[in-house]
Amino acid sequence: MNRPVFIAGVGMTPFGVLHDSITELSSKASLQALQDSGLVDARIDRLVVGCQNPDEFTGIGHLSTIMSDQLGLVPSGATRVETGPSSGASGFEVGCSFIASGLAESVLVIGAEKMSEVGRGIASKILAKMMSNENETRYGATPTALAALITRRYMHEHGLTRDELSLVPVKAHRNGAKNPLAHFQREVTIDEVNVSRIVADPLTLYDCSPMSDGAAAALLVSEKYIPKLPSKELIAKVLGVGHATDFHAIQHRDSITSFKATKVSADAAFKMAKCTVKDIDVFELHDAFSILELVNMEDIGLFPKGESINFVRDEITAVHGDTPVNPTGGLKSRGHPTGATGMAQIHDLVRQLRGTAPKGLQVQSARKGLAHNIGGLGNNMVVSILECFS
């Protein structure tokens, strides 16, 4: 980066089926972030909103301009960013770019989605639009169906069993049960996961993240603002951001059990951050389906191909383990309001680096954190690396 970028404040609403509108959710998260920073009265140069499809989910378009008006930021520039479910992380990347380039000194980034205003069938059709119509959706494919295809292939290649796969949502719910902002705050057992309703064989209900409402926000600032902040211990520094794509349809990719875009974006983020995966203390990885957490850990470089489940079983990826992954519940338990997820990951990492994560979910001595957000079904990835400032 040409200039360093810092996260001065973060905010997040609960995730779940909520009564608030998408603009109300965005406002609440934004005001929390501003209050958290201690810069409530500071000028905000730019507003960036990451959101997948508010037009169809809520009937509200032009969301960035609406939020600039509602938050009293006029005439600050306002931009909406969309890269499917990685829209929040892409919005974060754009916000960082504004500051790193010198185009702005302060940027408010919001990730938001409200999915509950339409029925599940309509929501599924909206989400399916991020897939290839020519090669996938026209034949009846859905994101869950393709995730099931990936799961079955992974099982074939690496001998993963149903009981082993169930360990992933069990861990997610164990963490989410302690997260007061999570959509699901209840632990589940392997048997509960195994016997829950089949959504797309072999994936059951507990293998799939929910359709949620929610918003998360962060105030990004340049070095100019550091002296104005109330406490340097609350600041996080952005070390690196990587972004990559892959072919739209999974049938055109080299592998369906490994995401090339994750590898490329992670490599770019590590190069910018001047560190390796061994330097990261806590990970927030995109686990919209159980299998994705296993695939992502391997693609990030945490574990050898086909062996990640062994580290889940041995609790290496638990909050108290050597490699904590999704300590606040991940998408599976925290929830997945698509455009909000990337910023929720940033919010949760900042709290980890500050040492203020929810009770029972704090990773000991966390100094560096990595967020990984998937757009589409593995074709538009963003990886961000943060470090505590003090």
Image (spheres, helix red, strand yellow):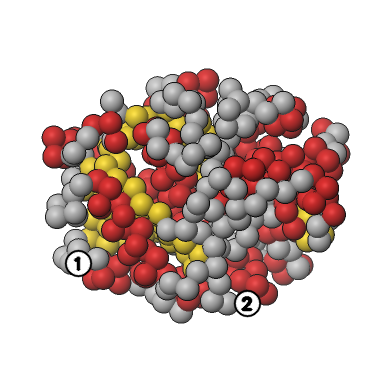
Left or right relative to 390: residue 25: right
Asked if 388 appears above or below 22 in the picture, the reply is above
Q: Badge 2 is on which residue?
A: 119
Left or right relative to 240: residue 320: right
Q: Which residue is at the far bottom?
A: 59
Q: Position of residue 234 (x, y in %)?
A: 29, 36
Q: Position of residue 182 (x, y in %)?
A: 54, 53
Residue 224 figure quarter: top left
- Residue lying at 63% horizontally and 77% vertically, measured from the top left: 119
Q: Secondary structure at mark 1?
A: loop
Marks 2 and 1, how far apart at CA: 33 Å
Tell me which amino acid carries mark 1.
Gly
Tell me which amino acid carries mark 2.
Gly
Left or right relative to 53: residue 28: left
Q: Position of residue 56 (x, y in %)?
A: 51, 75
Left or right relative to 230: residue 195: right
Q: Badge 1 is on which residue?
A: 72
Residue 205 figure quarter: bottom right
Camera sees residue 299? no
User: In what quadrant of the picture does the N terminus appear?
Assistant: top left
Q: Nearer the viewer, residue 31 or 157?
A: 31
Asked if 12 appears above or below 259 in the picture, the reply is below
- Residue lying at 44% horizontally and 39% vertically, measured from the top left: 357
Q: Which mark is residue 323?
A: none
Asked if 147 appears above or below 168 in the picture, the reply is below
Pointers 2 and 1 in contact (C-beta within 8 Å): no
Give the mark, 2 or 1, whose residue is nearer the N terminus: 1
